[in-house]
Image: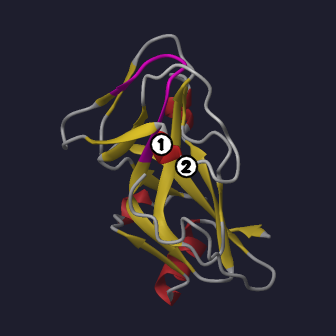
Amino acid sequence: MSILVGREITAAIGRGEITIEPLDPSQIGPGSVDLTLGNDFRIFKKQTGLCHVHNESDFADVTEAVSVADGEFITIAPCEMVLGITKERITLAETVAGWLEGRSRFARFGLAVHVTAGFMQPGISNRQVLEIVNLGHKPLALYPGTRICQFVFERCIGTAKYHGKFFDQLKP
């Protein structure tokens, strides 16, 4: 697979192989597209006891949905995780896949944007869920609209289309 550079990302958008809504052209960088933090989050309920993780587990059972208004912020304590989502919806052709990555400017504060789910399948059409963790020593205040992560696009050998549980996800 080959990583698309800025002008190739722009060309793929022009051909309809990649759709990003909304998109400001300034978000397109030399090898990725910056994505912004949305307003919707899922925070983990303060519960004790054992959380069973198996094929039938549902993260909604251990989290609650919250929404943060523009100009407001959500606070993440050290060693805490929340689920967030990007404002942008990304639709990929069956010949394009990608990787969600953090941005070094925020990693320097201890902010990680995904735990393990960084790969985005070909043919997706959704907003990107962020598994946001504060690995630092101070609480972090996150603001909707911040360019919090980046999406790296790759051309696939062959075609495929994701049809899984989160194909059309719009909320975390």
Q: Quadrant of residue 148?
A: top left
Q: Is residue 77 left or right of residue 50?
A: left
Residue at 47 percent across and 71 percent down: it is 168
Secondary element under disc 2, as helix, strand or loop, is loop
Tags 1 and 2 touching, CB below 8 Å: yes
Secondary element under disc 1, as helix, strand or loop, is helix
Q: Is residue 60 above or below residue 75?
A: below
Residue at 56 percent across and 83 percent down: it is 17
Residue 55 within the magenta-colored segment of the rendering: no
Q: Position of residue 149 (x, y in %)?
A: 50, 46
Q: Quadrant of the N terminus?
A: bottom right
Residue 79 within the magenta-colored segment of the rendering: yes
Q: Quadrant of residue 139?
A: top left
Residue that carries the numbered disc 1 in the rendered image: 61
Front-lying residue, 121 or 106: 121
Q: Position of residue 46 (x, y in %)?
A: 43, 22
Residue at 61 percent across and 48 percent down: it is 57
Mark 2 is on which residue type? Asp
> Magenta segment, principal secondary structure?
strand
Residue that carries the numbered disc 2 in the rendered image: 58
Q: Is residue 65 above or below residue 2?
A: above
Q: Quadrant of residue 53?
A: top right
Q: Is residue 62 left or right of residue 152?
A: left
Q: Position of residue 135 (x, y in %)?
A: 57, 21
Mark 1 is on which residue type? Asp
Label 2 environment density (alpha carbons within 10 Å; few <14, some 14–19, many ≥20): few
Q: Which mark is residue 116?
A: none
Q: Position of residue 103 (x, y in %)?
A: 54, 40
Q: What range of the chain is rendered magenta?
A: 75-84
